Structures are given as C-alpha cells and as structure tokens.
Amino acid sequence: MKTYSYLDSPMKVWGIIDFEKTHKLQRVPDELLPSLEVLPPKFAHRCPGARIGFRTDAKEIKVTMTLSSLWPDVGISIYGCQSFYLFAGSKSNGRYLGLGCPDTYDQMTFEKTFKKSARMEDILIWLPRNETIADVQISVNDEAAVEPPTPYKHEKPVLFYGSSITEGGCPTVFFNGYNCILSRWLDVDFYNLGFSGSARGERAMAEFIAGVDMSVFVYDYDHNSPTVETLRETHEPFFKVIREKRPDLPVIMMSRPCIEADKGVIARRDVIRQTYLNAKNAGDENVWFIDGTTFYGDTDRDLCSIDTCHPNDLGFWRMAKVIEPILKEAIEKSERADRG
C-alpha cells in the first residue's frame, strides 16, 4: 500500500484557520492565549470541525491516527470525542462508512480500514472533537489513484463562535453537531470556534475573528457568560469589533437552546436580541437574530437534550432545521456581495 500524511499533496485540510501557513491541527494560535485567560491550551490545540479530503478509486482506505492527548468526557462517549469518521461521495449526500476509535483511554495510536467500491469518489475524514492530534496517515492500495478533493459548493467558510454546544456537545457522533449538519446540508466549509465553558466574548477573540476570511459569522456564547450582566457588557461590544473591521459581513446572533425558557434564559435572549435591534435601527442590513427558545420546536422538547443544557442528536437536528434557511440566505447574500 502507499501512504500519505495529512500534510502531503493532494490531501486537503478544511476547518483550520490559516492551516496553509501554519500546517498545525489547532484552531487558535498560541500567541492569542495570554489574552484569553479562561481558555485552556488544550481547547485551543484541539480541532473539532477539521476535515481531511481527497478523491480516490481505492477499494480499501486505511486511516491511522496518533493522538497527543486523551481526555475522557463525562458527557460524551469515546465514539463522540476521540473518534474519526469517514464519508464517501458528495459532501452534501455522502455515505457514512464508519468510525475509527481507540479501544481504551490509554491507546494513543489506532487505525481502521474501510472498504468501498472502486469508482472514483470523494473521501472526507472528520477529525476528533476532544483531542489534540499528533499525526494522521492515510493508506490506499498501490494501484489506486489519489487526487485533490472536489471543492465545497460554498468555498468561503462560515465561522461559528460559541460554547460547548457550538464545539459539538453532546451528540453520539461528532458530525451530528448542528454546524456539521449545516455544512453537509448546504455544502459549505466552516470553522468551529466553540469552546467548552471558555467562550466569554473577549475583545481579543473578536479581533482575531474579525481578521478571518469568512462568508458568514455566527455567534452564540450565551451559556459561557457567567451572568446576564457580563453578557450585556460583552455581547454588543464583541459585535462592534467585528463590524468595524468587516462592515458588510453577514452576522447571525443566536441565543441558547433550552427545554424550558425560564427568566434567566429570557433575560439573556433579550440581551442578544437588543444587540441585533440596535444594529438594525442603525441601518445594518446584514444581521439576523435567532431565538434559541424556538430551536426544539413545540413538541417533545424534553427529548432534545442529554442534561437540559446540551443537545443530543435530535436537539442538534432541530437546531439545524431552524438555522438552515437563515444561514442559506446569509451565505447567498455574502456571495452576491463578493461578485459585486
């Protein structure tokens, strides 16, 4: 068999900001960390949402992954945190071929061989949510052709910033997170800047995000702000940092999903909505607001969460259904502006 590193041509890595420059499987640069006091380095160094793509007619594909960390998660199984996932076919309608995962929490290197037909098609490998990754090796039979992947229909990424929910907590498999579902449904690239307990709307993070080339910005760090007051102190200033540098960027503001909308949830929602209303009243036509209390629908809301905070697979699917038409509109508006 012949073997490629994730760094080798024609492999393509999506979902990592500036990967072509850094060649690192981490989503926040180390130099930003001193300005983000509550963000643990391990959260910055892992890369939920990162994907490796290529095209091949190989009948067998072996993926070998080496991790540099193993952090068991109380809310997600090893299938949802430490595994990689392989799809074949189009990005919007690919076939799920399965996952590879460690057998135990002390196994740092593991592999899985996947079988498929010999026709030429795209392969997409979703990387683990929770762990820092030391290496990924991809092996195919010697006679197989390996080519660059088909680009996304919408190549300019959407950037999502928020809490552990944004980061992918807690579906049974990572690619069932709402932003992953939206990426598949809309055939759009994306960056995942969700940070469990550590997204506080810091100005330094806003300045970093404002410098990223993206089509749409979506933010929903409601859960991570300690109080309604801290959310009020940071939410609109965060938006204004983005808007100052990116005056025409479509921005979607969301509040938290919930089973029951108590007074605290409503108060936080109203802070976020006020940022939106202030922008609209100032003439901003590139902002949208999504009320998180609507995410779970009108029936069986209690079936949508594992712990009343984090969505399960059904909860994420319902979130994606609400967000999809708004995100689609925002992407199309961004692309019209790019075309002039």
Image (cartoon, helix red, strand yellow):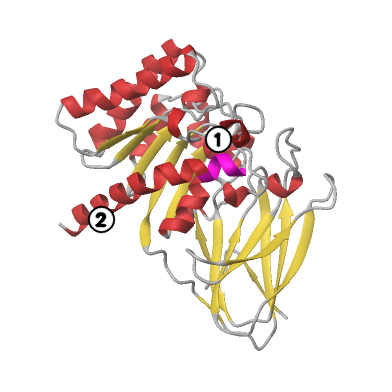
Is 181 part of what is drawn in magenta? no
Is 315 part of what is drawn in magenta? yes
Amino acid, disc 1: Ile
Q: In this view, does 244 lie above or below 231?
A: below
Label 2 packing within 10 angstroms: few (<14), some (14-19), many (20+): some
- Where is residue 142? Give x, y as percent: 68, 85
Q: Can residue 18 be seen in this view?
A: no
Q: In this view, does 253 lie above or below 189?
A: above
In the rendered view, does 234 fall on the left or right side of 114? left
**Of residues 211 and 250, the one drawn nearer to the viewer in this rendering:** 250
**Of residues 17 and 188, the one drawn nearer to the viewer in this rendering:** 188
Q: Can residue 43 be seen in this view?
A: yes
Residue span colored magenta:
313-317
Q: Mark 1 points at which residue?
A: 165
Q: Name the residue under label 2.
A: 335
In the rendered view, does 73 fall on the left or right side of 268? right
In the rendered view, does 169 fall on the left or right side of 210? right
Report the residue at 47% width, 63% height from top.
Answer: 92
Verify CB contact (< 8 Å) between mark 2 and mark 1. no
Element type at mark 1: helix
Label 1 packing within 10 angstroms: few (<14), some (14-19), many (20+): many
- Where is residue 205? Give x, y as percent: 42, 31
Amino acid, disc 2: Glu
Quadrant of residue 38 within the rendered picture: top right
- Where is residue 93? Give x, y as percent: 51, 66
Element type at mark 2: helix
Report the residue at 58% width, 84% height from top.
Answer: 119
Report the residue at 71% width, 59% height from top.
Answer: 99
Q: Is residue 76 above or below residue 33?
A: below
Q: Quadrant of the N terminus?
A: bottom right
Of helix, strand and loop, which mostly describes the magenta segment?
Answer: helix
Task: Report the label total.
Answer: 2
